[in-house]
Image: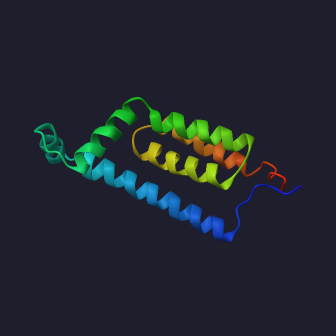
Amino acid sequence: MKLFLPGARATNWLLVVGFSSLGYALYMRYMAIEQSSVGLACAAGLNTWLCTSRAVVTVLFQYSAFGFAALAVALINLLRPSLVLFAVALCLTCLGIVLYNVALSTLAAGVLLLSFARRAPAPE
C-alpha cells in the first residue's frame, strides 16, 4: 500500500506555496490591516491596490471565509488526495491562521496531516 506522500520536487513547491501565502498573510495583517495610518488613509478615500486588498481581506475574514474554504478543500483532499488540492488547502490554511480564522484553519491543518495517512490514488 503506497501512501500519499509528495516527492522531493513536489515538497519544494509546497514549501514555496506555504511560505509565500504565509508571507502575504503576514504582510496584510501587520502592514495593511493593523496599521492605523493605512486604515485612516483608506477610509479617507485613497484608491490603491493596498486599500482594495485590505477591504477584500477584511470582508473575507469577517465571514471566516479562509477557515471554511481551508477546511472544505482539506476534507476533499482527505477523500481524494492530490498535490493541487493539498497546495490550495495549505495556502488557505496559512492565510486563515494568520488572518484571524484560527479555529477552522487549525482543524484544516489537522485534516491535511491526516491526508498523509491515506492511500495514494491509483494511476489510471
Residue drawn at 58 percent across, 65 percent down:
13
Rendering coords of residue 26 (x, y %): 36, 53
As drawn, the residue found furthest toward the right would be 1
Q: How many marks?
A: 0
Rendering coords of residue 57 (x, y %): 35, 40
As drawn, the residue found furthest toward the bottom would be 8
User: In the shown orientation, is residue 86 left or right of residue 96?
Assistant: right
Residue drawn at 51 percent across, 51 percent down:
91
Q: Quadrant of the C terminus?
A: bottom right
Colour approach in the figure: rainbow
Q: Is residue 107 visible?
A: no
User: In the shown orientation, is residue 30 left or right of residue 42?
Assistant: right
As drawn, the residue found furthest toward the left would be 44
Residue drawn at 78 percent across, 48 percent down:
118
User: In the shown orientation, is residue 109 left or right of residue 56?
Assistant: right
Residue drawn at 60 percent across, 40 percent down:
73
Rendering coords of residue 45 (x, y %): 12, 39
As drawn, the residue found furthest toward the front would be 124
Rendering coords of residue 9 (x, y %): 65, 70
Q: Is residue 69 visible?
A: yes
User: In the shown orientation, is residue 51 left or right of residue 99?
Assistant: left
Tell me: residue 6, above or below residue 39. below
Q: Quadrant of the N terminus?
A: bottom right
